[in-house]
Image: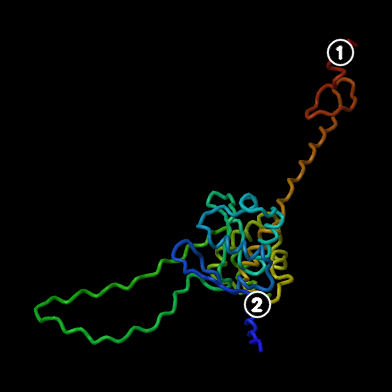
Amino acid sequence: MASSKRSARPRASGLIHRNVRHTTRYVVVGNHLAQHRELSLIAIGLSVHLQSLPAGAPVNVKALAARFPESELKIASAMRELERYGYLSRTRERLPDGRFVPRTISYNRPGADPDAAPVTPPPTPQPPPPPPPQDAPSSPPERPVREAPPTPLAEPDRPAADLLAGLRAYEPRLLLSERDVRRLAPGVTAWLERGADPDVVRRTLCADLPGGLISPAGLIAHRLSALLPPPLPTAPRAPAPPDPLQNCDDCDRAFRSPASGRCGDCRASPREAA
C-alpha cells in the first residue's frame, strides 16, 4: 500500500515584516498618520516626507513638484488634506519691516503641545547625605530659575489677537492657546488691513467646521492663508472742477478763467479806439 503524503501546511496570507532596527537617518511616524482612514496615500506620504526634512527646507508646491513625479495639482491637493486634518499649516508671517513671508509648519501629532515637558517617574528615594563637617562653610542657596517672559505682541496685531481670543464665544471648538493667538494674529491683521470687516473675518473662521476637529489652529491658519481677500482697488481721482465764469472787461462776454480780466479774443486783437 502506497504511503499517503501529508499535505503541505498553507502559508499565512497577508503582509510579512522583515524589519531591521534603524540607528541613523530615520523618522518616527505615528500609526494615526500611517493608517489614517481619511487621508489619501499621497497625503500620508507627503506628511512623512515633510517630517523627515530639516528645518528651513523649501516645501512649497513648486519645490515638491520638482522633487517628485506627482504634479503640482496633486501635491497642492495633498497639502490641503493635511491642513484639513491638522498635520500641516501654512501662514504668512509679518516681519518687523511690514513684509509678509510664507511659513509652513508640519505637525507629527496634531493637537499635541510640542512644548509640553515629558512625564517622568518620581525619582527613587535616596538616603540623606551625611552632614558636613562643622568647620566646612555652608553652600549658598541656589536662585530660582525664572522663565523668560513671552514675546510682547506687536501693537498693530492687538485687534487681531482680541478677535482670535474671542472666537470661542461664537464656536467653543475654536479655543486657541495664547501661543497660537500670537502666531495667527498677523494673518488676521492682513485681512483687516485689506478692508475686511471684523464680523466677516469671524464668520469666515467659524463657518462649516469639519466634524472631529483636531487642530483648530491649523484650520484657522489654512483659512487665513487660502481665503485672504485681495487689496482694495485704488479709488479713481475726481476730475478737477472747471474754472469759474468771468465777464470780460472789454466786451462783457462770459468766459471761464481762474481770475477776472479780458477774454481770449480781446487779448488776441488790439482794442479799437472809440
Callout 1 amino acid: Ser
Mark in the foreground, 1 or 2: 2
Viewer-proximal residue, 199 or 22?
22
How packed mark 1 is, by other alpha carbons closer than 10 Å (few <14, some 14-19, many 20 or more), is: few
Q: Residue at x 72, y 55 (%)?
A: 73
Left or right: 88 as drawn, with respect to 199: left
Q: Earlier in the sequence, mark 1 or mark 2?
A: 2
- Residue designated by label 1: 269
Q: Quadrant of residue 192?
A: bottom right
- Circle 1: element type: loop
Query: In this view, which residue lies farthest toward the left?
Result: 135
Where residue 146 appears, x then y in whole percent? Answer: 37, 70
Where residue 257 appears, x then y in whole percent? Answer: 81, 28
Where residue 103 appears, x then y in whole percent? Answer: 58, 57
- Circle 2: element type: loop
- Measured Cα–Cα span from mark 1 to mark 2: 112 Å
Q: Residue at x 59, y 55 (%)?
A: 59
- Residue designated by label 2: 13
* Residue 158 visible in this rendered orientation of the protein: no
Q: Residue at x 77, y 43 (%)?
A: 236
Q: Residue at x 53, y 52 (%)?
A: 96
Q: Quadrant of the N terminus?
A: bottom right
